[in-house]
Image: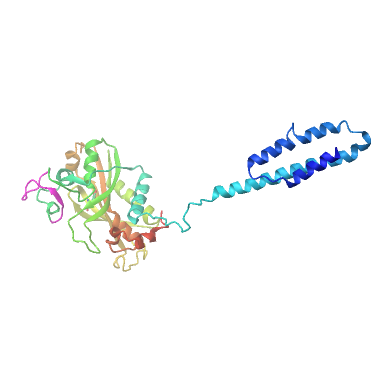
């Protein structure tokens, strides 16, 4: 029996496994219930008592040796398994260039996020519109200068002299989405409409023929100018910081009455005056007002029962204030060196 134990000890000692299958056959051969070690322990029962001590010790050592061999090989397999799982050998050794969101998308998402917290949902409308949605239903007089070819890109115009509700054009503002929403939904309505708009302007640092706006609309019973002011104050403080103040200056838009323009206190100088706010302490950010009864009626909403407010802001304008990038063209050129600077923003 001792001879047999020595023989097996040598075999175990020289054993090496290249695969899990090799290791498993080792386990079956030596360590399983029907394996060689079990057989030896079985034979051990018949050993003469005077040899029991010596043989027993050797047999236990053999078992320990087999177990150690098995466990060592098994754990080395586990380590290499983990290593190879984490290594993608097909991957380029150059670091990946991560993209970044466009600053206009970042600011648009922030605006949507703020208004969604007070119950505004997003609605969208087409960029190619007709005069009816962009001007007529918004109470623009037929001879209003915004309808001029100088200001608006027409796709088809029925008469060169007069404008017509069926004229097809590129929308000049997102206020057209107000009309579509009011025509298709019943109050209460609480919506914002981000989108691209087009105006026939020469491109410069301060003007572009394409830019982005966000329109807001709230229609219900008893909506007041105080609601408008409070909503805009909430928005401004979320967007520009909790110490931000707002002021409303009387203005004119055909589709709101009364109308106002809103300024926020300059966050660069804290209202003291600097070259960003042109030493006024205030920055103009949006137009707003109470929806004109003519607009409500044109969209089949009872202006005796319902009132509402609307506002519209330029996303480039807000991005300029936020990032101090004052050349509009940079937002459209998609120069990677410019866009790369917004990597850390969400
Ligand atoms: N549509 C206006 C523009 O493009 C912005 C605007 C002003 C929208 C007042 C409104 C509003 O809804 O009430 O300049």
Q: Nearer the viewer, residue 159 or 3?
A: 3
Q: Quadrant of the N terminus?
A: top right
Q: Nearer the viewer, residue 197 or 278?
A: 197
Q: Is residue 325 above or below residue 301?
A: below
Locate residue 12, reporting x and y percent. 75, 44
Residue at the image position 33 percent from the left and 51 percent from the top: 108
Residue at the image position 27 percent from the left and 36 percent from the top: 187
Locate residue 72, reporting x and y percent. 70, 46
Q: Is residue 62 left or right of residue 183?
A: right
Colour logic:
rainbow
Q: Is residue 113 part of the magenta span, yes or no?
A: no
Q: Is residue 21 left or right of residue 172?
A: right
Q: Is residue 91 left or right of residue 274?
A: right
Locate residue 306, reporting x and y percent. 24, 38
Q: Which residues are magenta?
A: 150-165
Q: Is residue 77 left or right of residue 317?
A: right
Residue 341, quarter of picture: bottom left
Per the picture, the main secondary structure of the magenta-coloured stretch is: loop
Q: Nearer the viewer, residue 56 or 257?
A: 56
Locate residue 282, reporting x and y percent. 30, 62
Q: Is residue 163 part of the magenta span, yes or no?
A: yes
Is residue 276 among the parts visible in the rendering? yes
Residue 182, quarter of picture: top left
Residue at the image position 68 percent from the left and 37 percent from the top: 25
Residue 9, quarter of picture: top right
């Amino acid at each position: 029996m001792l001879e047999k134990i020595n023989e097996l000890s040598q075999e175990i000692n020289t054993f090496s496994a290249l695969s899990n299958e090799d290791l498993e056959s080792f386990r079956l051969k030596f360590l399983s219930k029907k394996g060689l070690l079990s057989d030896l322990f079985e034979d051990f029962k018949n050993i003469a008592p005077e040899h029991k001590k010596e043989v027993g010790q050797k047999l236990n050592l053999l078992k320990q040796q087999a177990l150690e061999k098995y466990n060592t090989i098994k754990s080395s397999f586990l380590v290499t398994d983990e290593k190879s799982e984490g290594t993608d050998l097909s991957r380029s050794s150059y670091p990946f260039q991560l993209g970044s969101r466009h600053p206009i998308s970042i600011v648009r998402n922030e605006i949507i996020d703020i208004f969604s917290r007070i119950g505004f949902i997003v609605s969208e409308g087409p960029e190619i519109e007709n005069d009816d949605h962009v001007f007529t239903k918004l109470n623009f007089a037929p001879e209003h200068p915004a309808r001029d070819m100088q200001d608006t890109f027409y796709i088809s115009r029925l008469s060169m002299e007069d404008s017509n509700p069926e004229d097809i054009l590129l929308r000049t503002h997102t206020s057209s989405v107000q009309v579509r929403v009011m025509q298709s939904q019943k109050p209460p309505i609480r919506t914002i409409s981000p989108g691209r708009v087009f105006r026939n302007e020469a491109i410069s640092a301060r003007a572009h023929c394409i830019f982005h706006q966000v329109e807001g609309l709230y229609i219900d019973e008893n909506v007041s100018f105080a609601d408008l002011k409070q909503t805009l104050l909430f928005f401004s403080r979320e967007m520009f910081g909790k110490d931000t103040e707002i002021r409303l200056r009387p203005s004119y838009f055909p589709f709101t009455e009364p109308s106002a323009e809103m300024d926020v206190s300059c966050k660069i100088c804290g209202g003291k005056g600097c070259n960003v706010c042109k030493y006024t302490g205030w920055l103009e950010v949006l137009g707003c007002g109470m929806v004109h009864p003519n607009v409500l009626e044109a969209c089949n909403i009872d202006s005796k029962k319902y009132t509402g407010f609307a506002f519209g802001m330029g996303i480039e304008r807000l991005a300029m204030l936020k990032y101090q990038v004052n050349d509009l063209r940079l937002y459209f050129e998609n120069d990677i060196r410019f866009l790369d600077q917004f990597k850390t923003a969400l």
